[in-house]
Image: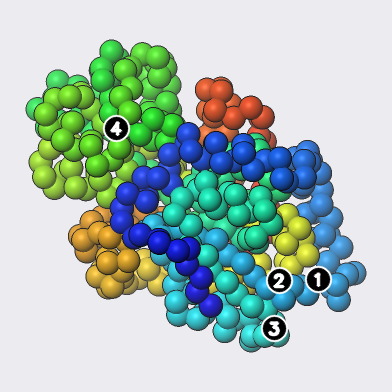
Amino acid sequence: MKKLLPNMTKKWKQFTAMLTLAAVLTAATGCGGSTESSTASDSVKDTTAAADSSSEQEGDLNQATELRIATQPVPAYLPLWLTNEKGWLEEALKEAGYENVKVTFTEFESGPPENESFAAGQQDIGVMGNVPSIGGLAAGQKRTFIGISENGEKTEAILVPPDSDIKSVADLKGKKIGLVVGSIVQNLLYNLLKEEGLTLDDVEQLNLATGEQLEALATGQVDAIATWQPMIAQIENEGVGKVLADGSGGVFLAENTIFAQDDYLAENPDIVRIVMEQYARGAKEVKDNLDQYAKDYADKYGLTEELLKAALVDAQFPIAIEDVDVEDLQGTADFLYEQGLIKTEVNVSEHTNNSFNDAVK
């Protein structure tokens, strides 16, 4: 049932790799040629048509003999992993009469290899951050967003030293900011600056891996850093920095998506619905037993129990995808296009199917 990529490490550095846009876009673009091109309207039309005619073609639907799910070994996707490790998904499929469906979970260390696998037709459903998800679409992959695996306005932030004279985002003008350039936090910084009438050109960005950020902030090499959990908690716990701003107030939701290959979604809507139901079950399980799961899975993610809890405590696992999520993802797509990081404009709403929302609430 479990399928792991060889030589998979379980350290926090893989989380940083997942969110690095430069590698993501290289992989997405490189594999784009192996996928059939289609317009956004064609994609939605196909999915919608299948849903509308499902009652007439019920005998032809949900005939898949396999279900291939792509995930990554990071805290955001723990609820999905539980459906695998506890056997919930296979049990639910059998109860619904799909006992012949072989379920395979594959863990990818980051977005690029996962995008490549989808482009090669090797996966059916996956979870991924906003940047690589949209990068895959821009590269021509046929995928539809069917849910939100995790988000959280406080899961990413700008931090400054405790005694800094920087008191607001506006004070960042002309300052040195350390971050993983091309990552999701660059999108956060862009949004925060835009709120103040500033742009990324108004600050000096220094490309720093997460492992370098704490020391850089502590030694004054940078005036601020932009990072994510659990690095935020680590910096605060060591007294090196404090949060200046995060995505609160709807500035940035830090969306992680759930998506399906268009053909698989159109041909197997009931199987996909069961996946979403069990995902929601895993999300509730994690939130209801956060302390226990932080203890049980700290080793899996290469974190201390305290840091894993910090990575999860502000995380939301909505599973359903709402209009506000689509709007936030569209903001990311516009940011990527505006900055020249993707070459094709993406209309997120045309690649979204929210028909599973009732099943997961």
Closer to the chain start, of discs 2 and 3, is 3
Q: Would you name the residue on which mark 4 appears? A: 208
Closer to the chain start, of discs 1 and 2, is 1
Q: Would you name the residue on which mark 2 appears? A: 270
Closer to the chain start, of discs 2 and 4, is 4
Closer to the chain start, of discs 1 and 3, is 1
Q: Is residue 78 above or below residue 26?
A: below
**Image quadrant in which you'd find residue 165:** top left
Residue 303: x and y in percent read 25, 59
Q: Is residue 167 above or below residue 8?
A: above
Q: Do we see residue 342 in this rendering?
A: yes
Question: Which of labels 4 and 1 is toward the front?
Answer: 4
Residue drawn 50% across the image and 74% down it: 2
Q: Is 241 or 207 nearer to us in this picture? A: 207
Closer to the chain start, of discs 3 and 4, is 3
- In this image, 37 relative to 214: left or right? right
- In this image, 279 relative to 202: left or right? right
Q: Would you name the residue on which mark 1 appears? A: 61
Badge 3 local density, few (<14 within 10 Å), some, or many (20+)? few
Residue drawn 63% across the image and 60% down it: 123
Residue drawn 37% across the image and 50% down it: 15
Q: Would you name the residue on which mark 3 appears? A: 100
Q: Amino acid at mark 2?
A: Asp
- CA distance separating discs 4 and 1: 49 Å
> What secondary structure is found at the residue carrying circle 3?
loop
Q: Amino acid at mark 3?
A: Asn
Q: Is residue 95 above or below residue 271?
A: below
Q: Is 120 or 129 nearer to us in this picture? A: 120
Q: Are marks 2 and 4 in contact (CB under 8 Å)?
A: no
> What secondary structure is found at the residue carrying circle 4?
loop
